[in-house]
Image: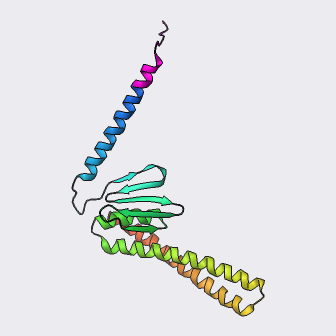
Amino acid sequence: MDKSHIENKSQIEQAVKLAIRHVREWTRSELRTILSKPRVRTEIPIIIPLGPRGFLVGDYAMLQTGSVWNMIYRYNDQELEFVERDAAIFYAVCQQTNRLSMAEQLYKYDQNINRLNVKVEQFKTRLERASRNRNSNAKDLYVSRHSETVAQLKRNQFLLEKTLNLAKYFNC
């Protein structure tokens, strides 16, 4: 076999850059046409991953900021925060397929989980402070409140998981 020598590597690199640019522009134009196409209200919206930290779910854009998923609605910039990624995705899907009650349940349970996680940490800190100060009354109070909040947290996590499973079966 004869060896083929490439005389000008810059021509090949330029051709590769042109091909990459063409594919990128084609992808963006196809995405624009898909997103601008009117869809039936009961049809499941398209879900597109936007890199490692976000998703596009129909008319909603979701970006992860730390441990929270920020969701922005396309037409009125309504921003919602979710702790669970799955809850955020199913909320967007249910909102766009007219399953509004299920979407509201998902949002409510997710917000309750977020609120209860904060409360658990507060009671844990207060319990440690009461233990350091050797205040048995405050310690008993915070042990009781901490255990009650943990029970509420587990209940809301169970209800969220149950609603997510229900949403999967309904294909909302």
Q: Position of residue 4 (x, y in %)?
A: 47, 10
Q: Is residue 168 visible?
A: no
In the shown orientation, is residue 130 left or right of residue 25?
Answer: right
Image quadrant of residue 120? bottom right
Q: Is residue 121 above or below residue 40?
A: below
In the shown orientation, is residue 26 left or right of residue 54?
Answer: left
Image quadrant of residue 59? bottom left
Residue 9 in the magenta stretch? The answer is yes
Q: Considering depth in this image, is 15 or 170 the residue closer to the camera?
A: 15
Q: Position of residue 84 (x, y in %)?
A: 48, 66
Q: Is residue 103 above or below residue 35?
A: below
Tell me which residue sits at (46%, 72%) in the image. Answer: 110
Tell me which residue sits at (29%, 43%) in the image. Answer: 29
Q: Quadrant of the C terminus?
A: bottom left
Q: Is residue 123 visible?
A: yes
Q: Position of residue 14 (x, y in %)?
A: 41, 25
Residue 54 in the magenta stretch? The answer is no
Q: Is residue 166 above or below residue 45?
A: below
The single residue placed furthest to the bottom in the displayed view is: 137
Q: Which residues are magenta?
A: 1-14
Q: Position of residue 153 (x, y in %)?
A: 54, 77
